[in-house]
Image (cartoon, helix red, strand yellow):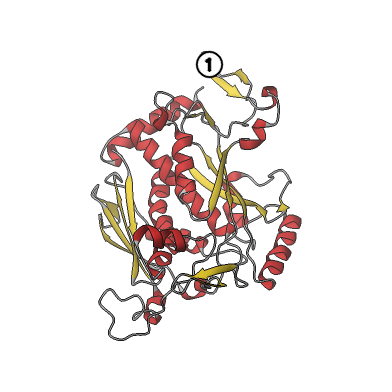
Amino acid sequence: MSLRFLTAGESHGRALVGIIEGVPAGLELDTTQIHAQLKRRKLGYGRGNRQKIETDELEILAGVRYGLTLGSPIALTIANRDWSRWTDIMASEPPAREGRRRVSVPRPGHADYVGGVKYGHDDMRNVLERSSARETAMRVAIGSVARIFLASFDITIASRVVRVGAVVDEAPLAIPLGLLNAVLDERPLRVADEAAEAAMIAAVDAARDAGDSLGGVFEVFATNVPIGLGSYAQWDRRIEAEIGRAFLSLNAIKGVEIGGGFTSARVPGSQVHDAYLPGDEPGRVRYASNRSGGIDGGMTTGEPLVVRAAMKPIATLMKPLPSVDLATNEATSAHIERSDTCAVPAAAVIGESLLALVLAEALLEKFGGDSMREIAPRIREWQGAALRR
């Protein structure tokens, strides 16, 4: 059994659509949990007005009956409330009248220009509508299905923001991972150190006032992950490769680290690798640290996974950069779309869903089966053996 998904939909189109295939039959799917994750994605200081418009109400169209998955593809949809203001501009039929909001001036750093060249569009709205991060609402919904599957085996996922612009949260994490989301979801930027968060808020305010934007860095954690997910046997089965691909597929992500990441390149091996300590029985060890971030040799170690991602500033600037009107070849200022000043907290929440999808796929690959009744005993037996080490 393998897990795969597709999304469709434009930012100001009628709706976002998603299909996820490979979810075992018999998984209890509580839509209130999915709605809770969609609400978390909308949070964060520095978000734009779009978050006040969209309610992100999810509807399940297929694959679930009486609250249980059927084993068949699950179809989901999220209506775009903003569609009512864009029906003429984003209609699928030929326009009844002229006056469409054509976009011929690309934004530096966005998909507008390259996408227009690639697909031969003279109106770059055909590019920016699909390349918009609005699509990630559906990925959070789909990832939430994977999260519910993981939660059946006590695998939990959490995140935090560790950098916004030049301001870094350098304090050791003192909040238990099991409580991290509950605590940080109440904070404006989802930062553990409140002094650092105050400085970050000031930086976001300054960027907004200047018509600029800010990126940052976030961390995603997964706990109680079974040992041995992934493999060293082939290059494309190493689990950090799948994690990297998933995170780099997220809008504006330019770098991904596992554990110590780039820091590991600057210090001796004695400060990088995790020493082994005697386990509770022969053939098993305990880890003295978790500098590897829960992955060694392409496989999970059973320690918490730690993934860090770097997000560049959003490409839409209220004080736009120089650009070119491709219709006239004249220099001008870049096109402006409604946008955020900083979306790093939202990216952290989306990252949780991406990690959930990778781990759910790895779990299904290792343990197989078409129903929860078939899969659950295998995973629990494996987890029990790991706990006895």
Whether residue 127 is visible, yes or no, is yes
Rendered location of residue 217, percent (x, y): 62, 50
Q: Residue at x 67, y 23 (%)?
A: 269
Q: Quadrant of the N terminus?
A: top left
At mark 1, the secondary structure is loop
Vertical side of 258 occupied by 40: above or below: below
Q: Quadrant of residue 174?
A: top right
On the rendered structure, is 152 left or right of 69?
Answer: right
Q: 188 or 26, which is in the foreground?
A: 188
**x, y percent for residue 204:** 68, 65
Residue 349 location in percent, x, y? 52, 55
The residue identified by callout 1 is 281
Identify which residue is drawn at 71% across, 60% down: 200
Q: Residues within 10 Å of mark 1 (few under 14, many from 20)?
A: few
Single out the residue that lies furthest toward the top: 282
Q: In this orientation, which residue lies closer to the viewer: 137 or 287? A: 137
Count of numbered circles in the view: 1
Q: Answer left or right for 214 relative to 199.
A: left
Q: Position of residue 355 (x, y in %)?
A: 47, 45
Rendered view: 323 above or below 4: below
The kind of residue tagged 1 is: Glu
Residue shown at 73%/46% (left/top)? Answer: 170
Q: Residue at x 45, y 43 (%)?
A: 245
Of 381 and 135, the residue lying toward us: 135
**Residue at far front of view:** 329
Rendering quarter of residue 207: bottom right
Residue 155 visible (yes or no): no
In this picture, is 272 found above or below 313?
above
